[in-house]
Image (cartoon, coloured by chain):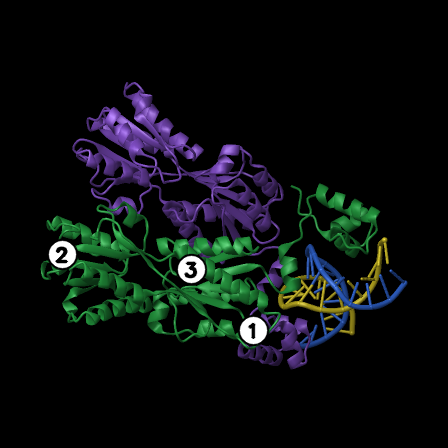
Chain colours: A green, B purple, C yellow, D blue
DNA sequence: TTGTAGGCGTTATCAA
DNA sequence: TTGATAACGCCTACAA
């Protein structure tokens, strides 16, 4: 078991000083050709690679980015993560990922842990519990320490930092608008009880589109389902039984798929009798029958932009100091029309 | 912007030595009560937290685990990852994740990067290209350096290390066996052209079950599809048109869903006329219609066990040295019967 | 052209 | 009871 070799080892072996070795490996002009060659050859032979930790300690940066997301088994977060990872890697950064599991405490713990020198900056999406508690002291703490932070998707106005979000309200508006233009009048919204910020915006879009078209809001046409699974279909069945509905906007694709199944069992035809659109353009949408028209949130792009914003902040740190200007980047969702809507 | 405070800062402020502060914060018996209280109060006030990097440098461990997987937008890997993350976290480890994107080069680069001190051990699943090239020198290099390694799912016999795998062959065997017992005779296998090791095992199980039941192997009943999407359905349509098939085993759920759609369009009834079973018990299986019977690979458990094996090796390092005993843990897949099979 | 010394933040050993 | 010193691995200003 050949242990990792250090500058010191090389120096000892070649009977030169450590700094000579260090300089030689950096091809410094100060060092004589012979010595350089000797050192470089030796280093190559023994596969010398500088120790990341030592460099981090010396240079005060780690080339690591901390990502904290509520859930990893989730198509949207997963695509965002891919975007982050890709961009970060191309810039020489590694990604340390922590899953908050929608828990406030885990979010705080993970954040504090990473903040103690392990990373140069954070990218995160708030846990449901954090949104609920409305307690962001851990974020404040971290930004106070001068650690750059980028929030995406589940963000909050309370914190002043870079953000990447979807145009949730506008895209919802335009989907409902589209429903109306294609002759639908009884439009339902299926939403979730947490996810506050995002869901709220989507609902705003829904409501404002109705209003815009002079359609009175009917609260009965809004179905609120628990975010975490394992409910029976009865709630859904009741909903569609007691309401006459010809179009549905769902805040995620799982809700959409479930509703479609229920409705199909009731003998209602999609999209002839009822149209469906869901957020999250994932696997389920693509492979449902009928294929679900859905709103692509462009997670990859969100991730890439988030990473870009973060790395920019990290690397700018040197230059300026206190004239922080924060941006909020808005990604435009795209309605991917498939079989669950009419044109 | 209050910068992170260090031992040195506290020492200067309180006019004691650094080592006194260090000891006081560790509640060392050597330090007088007064000093301890003073130091601890000050540290709390300024929210002192030791710097992870410095500790890593000193102690030669990082409390980081490196995970390298081929793809993050993939239900199975994602569940394994969740298992790893959960266990690792509970043991005080963070997880650095790198995605090889099925590329040999990215796998090598990521691995080398992390191996230079950033992590205490690796958990990984081989990229398709690596399996294809059959080149594992980067793994050998890493294990030679004494860095513990655990492989899961996509493993290789070439490398001597801990492994966690599914009983791919056996579970395939038993599914086909079940098909036969329920009266099916013309059983197809839909597989992929890479993924070598795992697919191969699954095919072995398929073939051996046929043989076991005296059913001659018909190579025409094996459909090989490209792993990376975006093929037309024609290939699948042709396959089912030119073969009389009454049961299908698919190596993943996407293939299964696609085949089911094709078959349904042809007017064939599932499961009356034809049964389907797919590997990967993901979202698609659960929400397909009919719901797909599928083989749960227990990713969470695989991840947890992998993390457990790894951390054990990492922390044992001190004790013994060279009598390395490597284990291969076999996880038993479970057939989840839903609507696409008859009982 | 090469080497010495100090420092990044922490801990451990030994001395005072 | 407290402090000085060295060390982890690397880098760099400065000295030789």
Circle 2 chain: A
Q: Position of residue B3 (x, y in %)?
A: 58, 74
Circle 3 chain: A
Disc 2 crowd rating (10 Å Cα; few below 14, some 14-19, many 20+) is some
Q: Give the residue pinned by disc 2.
A: A237
Nearest to viewer (mark 2 / mark 3): 3
- Between A68 and A290, the residue placed more toward the observer is A290
Nearest to viewer (mark 3 / mark 1): 3
Q: Evaluate if marks 2 and 3 touch, with contact meaning CB atoms under 8 Å apart.
A: no
Circle 1 chain: B
Q: Is residue A198 visible?
A: yes
Q: Secondary structure at mark 3?
A: helix
Mark sitting earlier along the chain (2/3): 2
Q: Position of residue A119 (x, y in %)?
A: 54, 62
Marks 2 and 1, how far apart at CA:
55 Å
Residue at position x 52%, y 52% from top? B65
Q: Give the residue pinned by disc 3.
A: A302
Q: Is residue A202 above or below residue B67?
A: below
Q: Position of residue B153 (x, y in %)?
A: 43, 39
On the picture, is A199 further left or further right than B197?
A: left
Q: Is residue A320 above or below residue A254?
A: below
Q: Quadrant of the N terminus of chain B?
A: bottom right
Q: Give the residue pinned by disc 1.
A: B48
Q: Position of residue B48 (x, y in %)?
A: 56, 73
């Amino acid at each position: 078991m050949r242990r990792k070799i250090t500058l010191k080892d090389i120096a000892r072996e070649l009977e030169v000083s450590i700094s000579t070795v260090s300089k030689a490996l950096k091809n410094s002009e100060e060092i004589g050709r012979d010595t350089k060659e000797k050192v470089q050859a030796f280093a190559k032979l023994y596969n010398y690679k500088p120790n990341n930790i030592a460099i981090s300690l010396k240079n005060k940066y780690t080339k690591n980015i901390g990502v904290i997301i509520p859930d990893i088994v989730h198509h949207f977060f997963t695509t965002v993560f891919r975007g982050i990872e890709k961009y970060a890697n191309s810039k020489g950064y590694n990604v340390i990922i922590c899953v908050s599991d929608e828990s406030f405490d885990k979010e705080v713990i993970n954040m504090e842990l990473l903040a103690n020198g392990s990373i140069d900056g954070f990218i995160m999406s708030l846990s449901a519990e954090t949104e609920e508690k409305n307690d962001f002291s851990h974020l404040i703490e971290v930004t106070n320490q001068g650690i750059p932070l980028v929030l995406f998707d589940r963000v909050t106005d309370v914190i002043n930092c870079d953000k990447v979000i979807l145009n949730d309200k506008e895209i919802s508006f335009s989907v409902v608008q589209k429903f109306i233009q294609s002759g639908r009048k009884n439009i339902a919204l299926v939403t979730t009880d947490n996810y506050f910020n995002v869901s709220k915006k989507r609902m705003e879009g829904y409501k404002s589109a109705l209003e815009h078209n002079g359609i009175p809001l009917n609260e009965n046409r809004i179905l609120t389902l628990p975010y975490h699974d394992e409910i029976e279909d009865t709630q859904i069945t009741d909903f569609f039984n007691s309401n006459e509905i010809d179009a549905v906007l769902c805040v995620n694709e799982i809700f959409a798929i479930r509703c479609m199944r229920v409705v199909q069992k009731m003998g209602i035809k999609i999209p002839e009798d009822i149209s469906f659109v869901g957020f999250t353009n994932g696997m389920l949408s693509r492979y449902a029958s009928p294929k679900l028209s859905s709103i692509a949130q462009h997670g990859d792009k969100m991730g890439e932009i988030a990473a870009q914003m973060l790395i920019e902040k990290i690397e700018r740190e040197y230059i300026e100091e206190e004239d922080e200007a924060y941006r909020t980047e808005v990604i435009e969702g795209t309605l991917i029309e498939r079989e669950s809507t009419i044109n």
